[in-house]
Image: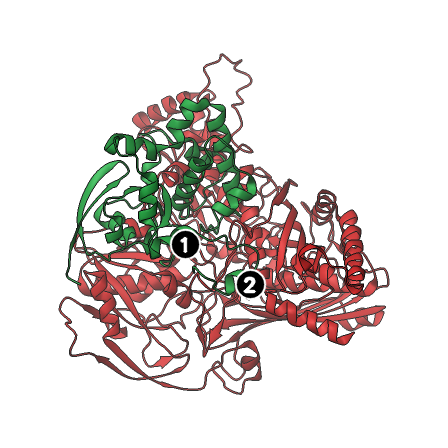
Chain colours: A green, B red
Amino acid sequence: MSAVLTLDFTVNGKRRRVRVPPMKRLLDVLREDCGLTGTKEGCGEGECGACTVLMDGVPVNSCLVPAVQAAGVKIVTVEGLAKGPALSVLQRAFVERGGTQCGSCTPGILVTAHALLQRAKGRVPGDAEVRVALAGNLCRCTGYQMIVNAVRAAARETLASGPGRAARTARPVAREQGKSARAKSKPVKTKAKARTTATVRAQAKPARAKAGVARRRPGPGR
Amino acid sequence: MTRTPTRRARPKTTLRPQPAVGVSVPKRDGEEKVTGRALYVDDLKFPGMLHGRTVRSMVARGIIRRVEFDPAFDWNGVVIADHKDIPGLNCVAHLTEDQPLLAVREIEHADQAILLVAHADPERAQAALGAVRVEVESIDAVLSIEDSLAARVKIRGADNVLKEYNIARGDLAAGFADADVVVEGVYRCGHQEQLYLENNGMIAERTAEGGIVVRGSMQCPYFVHHALQRTFGLPPERIRVIQTVTGGGFGGKEDYPSLLAGHAALLAWKSGRPVKIVYDRLEDIAATTKRHPAVVRVRTGHRRDGTLVATDVDAVMDGGAYVTMSPVVLSRGALHAGGAYRCPNVRIRARAMATNTPPNGAFRGFGVPQTVYAMESHMDRVAAELGLDPLVLRRRNAVVVGDVTPTGQVLHESVSAVEVLDRTAERAGWAEKRRRYGRENAAAERAERAGRFAPGGRRLRRGIGLALGWHGAGFTGGGEVRLNSLAALDLSPEGRPRVLAANVEIGQGAITVFTQMVAERLGVSPDLVLVETPDTDRVPNSGPTVASRTTMVVGGLLEQCARAMRERLELFAERALDGDADFRRVARRFLAERGPLRVERRYQKPAHIVWNEETYQGDAYPCFSYGAVAVEVEADLDTGEVRVLRVTTAQDIGRAIHPLLCIGQIEGGTLQGLGWALLEEVRWKDGRIWNHQLTNYIIPTAVDAPPLDVLIVENPYSGGPFGAKGVGELPMDVPAGAVVAAVAHATGARMDEIPITPERLLRALDGREERR
């Protein structure tokens, strides 16, 4: 219990070193040791997605990731989505289109949506695709429709404003990688590294589709 | 969409600024929420802060025999508080004072708080919990409405009834004698967890002057303020309650925060250090309030053409172990139990029963979802028995201007029951879909009998169902008079108008709407208007953030304040004000020459509203909002799964001050209603909640949520600011009845209990097939 890990990792483009117990939840490391309280805890068991952060570009539930697994990785939290004082296209779409109400789920949803837009690269994801991507992020306020609308509107706007703008607004991770470790292009490798038991469960974010049954009987991976 | 003061020259005679009301301006708290800058209670830290934890009962009912502290545990630095440490009354003051803050001897429900521990290290605090052993002698508990009614075990008086209301109008016996058809049904619904994403949490401090400051997640700062006065025996000025950014409430942060604040404050009082208690999800679901389960018996008499001539409702709700909010929830449920229908002969009986379960409390709708679900399920049954289209049956009976409610209230204006029905039906393609789904289901059944199955072999059926609901805005009966709300508007030192109200932003958009209404009357942009943080040292008591009252009642007071402020400033300037820059110029000059400017307005009951609390007759609400919902579902006959394909709803809310926020309320409330109807079930074992986690208490995800087609109907109410009525709760009231009807249309199974889980639907389908 008293073992302490010296954890070196990158958070929102800044290199960080913290000394924490190796099994401390990444969520708590970010909130307590890094002072980044934007990431929220909703359930503590990987169901609600409020604590979603990007770990080498992959959305994970940070409540299920022990600190030791964050060694050497690049983390993006909600605080890393805006570029300076200006909101990102995605953040602005959420404000303008009713995508945020109480705001507790918002950080996790923005991070998940941000990753989706990066994956979609210059394509506007369909309604169903956005919903599946967000199925591991619970929201109790909105009914989800305005969230889906905001994500798609951001994709459309990014697309309309040209490739240069798109790269700037939708890919801060690439930007950070460029800054901190330009020589190493290692997204594929780090993705593989992130795939440990906890994070696979976290990132799997299964589409708990349809009513009742599927979610009532835990299947493999849950 | 923000407006900067226009510099265009305008003729002095037309000083109309661009409107602020009716425009979807950016949400005031949007930016801090999308950047992660918003600070919720768990994001705050204070020097020397301790973390509090709660020792709870494992049994539903019993007597505390012994409390042991493990001598092997290192108790250094652990603060312990129990009921003996409470300086004032050991109670959580709501309507009554029957709920103890900490158990003394009797345990009346599982997860009841017995004692509190705190430590600077949250892990040590957690460990201390495990080192306290409470020996409780278990006794026979009452765990259901049925057990409570049977009164074999008595836990409250002779009959376990916490509260009863009776409402009567006309001659019920004559009404039933006059009826061609009498239909009866019993409708059940279970607990529902609010499941705000941010759990309940509070931080308390003891001040150097011997007072208490509490910060936290809450809907009603002055409820907490009142409760702490009783618990600590302190005068009001020594207690300060401050709302932090609140991650959703839905009623779940109406009364419970009073209890939690008492716990945190007691530990702070004893230790002299700031104490934070933030529940994790498990504790929040296990210990905090839920929607009241209900069993509602409805018997109606009709003419052959469907006309309602008699309505007899007997609604029983499970109040839990203490009175808390149950009388008011029950009252509202009873007042809406007849549905938005005209009926000359009515009897409504409503009872809240005591059980040994955690007290049930406020949840969006506040008793109305239960009774409206029952009445709407019943109307669908009546339509089936009479061979009428459910839309036709509802249109024939829906209230119109001049109709009278069961309490004798004449509906004078802003009555839109028929309009919301028609617009919903038209938009949903009701008649066409009703026929088409019926035809397709019959064809599928014929094909399956002949051995021809759809691709994949799935036996799917689709259906569409309709429901109508109403919701009285503001407090019930004389409630608003008792609240005596006071709201104010003042000038900030830099000459900006500033809203002073105790009503809180919990995501719904309250503060944005306040800035719009004030801006409209002052002729400035909403951006210019400041909103003070709800802090009992700084804002007057404008009442709780509940009952769909914030926009209509408190917004109305602020609108009056703004008119008065404008008048004062224009008299001072001896001319009309013209936009943001001019307002600030005049305001700063006023502050320099005349000093501070603060305008207050107190709630005045409109003279025509008359309510008799004794007889339960009169004007229960100043007005009602109306909503209709059409739900389309697809049911799988083999798995029992029900998928919602689409929801169409028209809701009359008087006037949409901020259309986007209003639609947000309607969409969110509708999805909570669908969750309640299909997915959300609190499961119990020996009086404890068995599924107190998000893994097995299921709320809808983005994939479960259907497309929601929302139509706002604006039928203004003359007593509301700009014509606005309430919008917050109505959307939760209506969907469940429409889901039941849609499932009946799709499968022929008439479900009389929600949620319609696959297990329940399969049982109903089995029963139906056996009967064949």
Query: Can see residue B314?
Result: no
For residue B688, which quarter of the picture? Answer: bottom left
Above/below status of B307 relative to B352 = above
Query: Can see residue B450?
Result: yes
Chain to which mark 1 belongs: B
Question: Percent position (x, y) of residue B460?
Answer: 69, 58
Q: How many marks?
A: 2
Callout 1 environment at 10 Å: few (<14), some (14 to 19), or many (20+)? Answer: many
In the drawing, does residue B634 fall left or right of residue A151?
right
Q: Which residue has dot 1 on it?
A: B220
For residue A10, which quarter of the picture? Answer: top left
User: Which residue is rendered at x = 50% and y = 68% of the image?
Assistant: B682
Query: Of helix, strand and loop, which one carries label 2?
Result: helix
* Three-letter residue code for mark 2: Val
Closer mark to the observer between disc 2 and disc 1 = 2
In the drawing, does residue B587 fall left or right of residue B53?
right
Alpha carbon distance from label 2 to label 1: 38 Å
User: Which residue is rendered at x = 48% and y = 67% of the image?
Assistant: B360
Q: Which residue has dot 2 on it?
A: A213
Task: Give the camera-side residue of A18 and B349.
Answer: A18
User: Which residue is rendered at x = 55% and y = 16% of the image?
Assistant: B13
Question: Percent position (x, y) of residue B447?
Answer: 79, 59
Above/below status of A213 relative to A78 = below
* Three-letter residue code for mark 1: Cys
Question: Percent position (x, y) of residue B555?
Answer: 49, 42
Above/below status of A82 relative to B237 = above
Callout 2 environment at 10 Å: few (<14), some (14 to 19), or many (20+)? Answer: some
Question: Percent position (x, y) of residue A48?
Answer: 42, 54
Task: Give the camera-side residue of B743 and B234.
Answer: B743
Chain to which mark 2 belongs: A
